[in-house]
Image (cartoon, grey):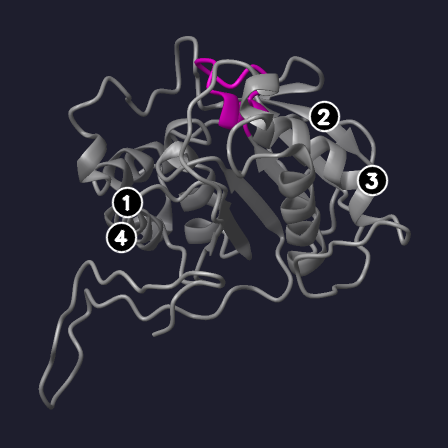
Amino acid sequence: LRPQKNADKLSLVEVHVFGEGEIPSWVQRWQPQHEKADLLLISAHPDDELLFMGGTIPYYAGERKMAVQVAYLAPSTPYRKLELLDGLWLCGVKNYPEIGNFPDHFAASIRSMYQKDGWSEKAVLEYVTWLYRRYQPDVVLTHDVSGEYGHGAHRVASDIAQKAIAKAADEGYRVWNFEERPLWQVKKLYLHLYEQGALRMDWRVPLEAFGGKTAFDMAEAAFQCHVSQLDTEYKVEDFGPYDNSKFGLAFSTVGEDESKNDFFENMAK
C-alpha cells in the first residue's frame, strides 16, 4: 500500500487478516484498471454513479460483461471510498476504479465551482482528457448539464466531458500533470437528462447475472453500501425530476440513435 500521488499519509479504513485456507467469497480481489474501456462512467462523487446513472453499471458490467471503467472526481472521505468499492463490487465491477483527488466542495454554479480550490477548469480538463487517453473509451457517460439538483461539481463533469473530447484527439494539447498517453477519439458521449438525442433505458428487465434481479434492483442494493448517505433525502429513482433512466446523446461519430435503448447502438459491440 502506498499513499496517493503527492499525499503525505495513507488512510486505512478497514483491515481483515486471514489465516491459512481458502479466502472467503466476500473478499474483494480487485483486478487492475482496464487498459481499454468500452464504457467510461465519470461520477462527480461516490454514489452519483447509482443515483443518476441508475442501472448502467450492473447492466453493462455485470450482465453484458463489458469493460466498464468508473472514474470519480471528488472521492470525499476515506470511508466513502470504501463504500464506493463495496457498491461497485456488488454491481459486477471487478476492475479498480479511477479515483480523482479534487476537493469535495459545493457551489451552485459552474463559474463558482471553477473558482473553488483545486477545481480550476484547466485542472479538471487535463484530468478528464487524460482519462480519455488512458482508458480509450468508446462511450462516455456522465452528469446532467444542470448538475441534477444544481451541484457545481456535477455541472463541471458534464461541461468538461464535452470539452475533453476534442482535447483528447488534439496532438497539440499536452496533459502536463499526467503520464503521456496516445491520442484518442471518443465515439459517443451521453449526458444524464440531456434533451438532444433523448433515450430512456429500461433498468427493470431481469438479469441472468444477478439471479433475475434487475439492474434497478442492483443499483438500489449498491446504494445501501453507501452507509454514510442513507440518512439523506437521496434515492435511486427511475422517475421524477432526476430520473436515472433518461439520457441524451451529446456527441457521436457513428450517427444518431434510432432504437434508443442501448448506449452501444451503432457500435460493433
Distance from Cα at disc 2 to Cα at disc 1: 30 Å
Q: Which residue is mark 1?
A: 80
Q: Which residue is mark 2?
A: 250
Q: Earlier in the sequence, mark 3 or mark 4?
A: 4
What segment is highlighted magenta in the picture?
143-155
Residue 74 in sight here: yes
Q: Earlier in the sequence, mark 2 or mark 3?
A: 3
Quarter of the image for residue 18 reads: bottom left
Q: Is residue 154 magenta?
A: yes
- Using the image, determine if residue 239 lies above or below residue 69: above
Q: Which residue is mark 3?
A: 166
Q: Which residue is mark 4?
A: 82
Mark 4 touches mark 1? (CB < 8 Å): yes
Q: What is the three-letter code of the residue carrying label 1?
A: Arg
- Mark drawn on residue 203: none
Which residue of the protein is positioned furthest toward the right in this rendering? 172
Q: Position of residue 54 (x, y in %)?
A: 41, 31
Under circle 2, the secondary element is strand
- 260 or 183, which lies in front? 183
Task: Tell us which disc is closer to us: 4 or 2.
Answer: 4
Q: Is residue 36 magenta?
A: no
Answer few, some or many: residues within 10 Å of disc 1's Cα (few below 14, many 20 plus, some between 14 and 19): many
Distance from Cα at disc 3 to Cα at disc 4: 34 Å
Q: Residue at x 69, y 26 (%)?
A: 249
Q: What is the three-letter code of the residue carrying label 4?
A: Leu
Q: Earlier in the sequence, mark 4 or mark 2?
A: 4
Q: What is the three-letter code of the residue carrying label 2?
A: Ala
Under circle 3, the secondary element is helix
Task: Tell us which disc is closer to us: 2 or 1.
Answer: 1
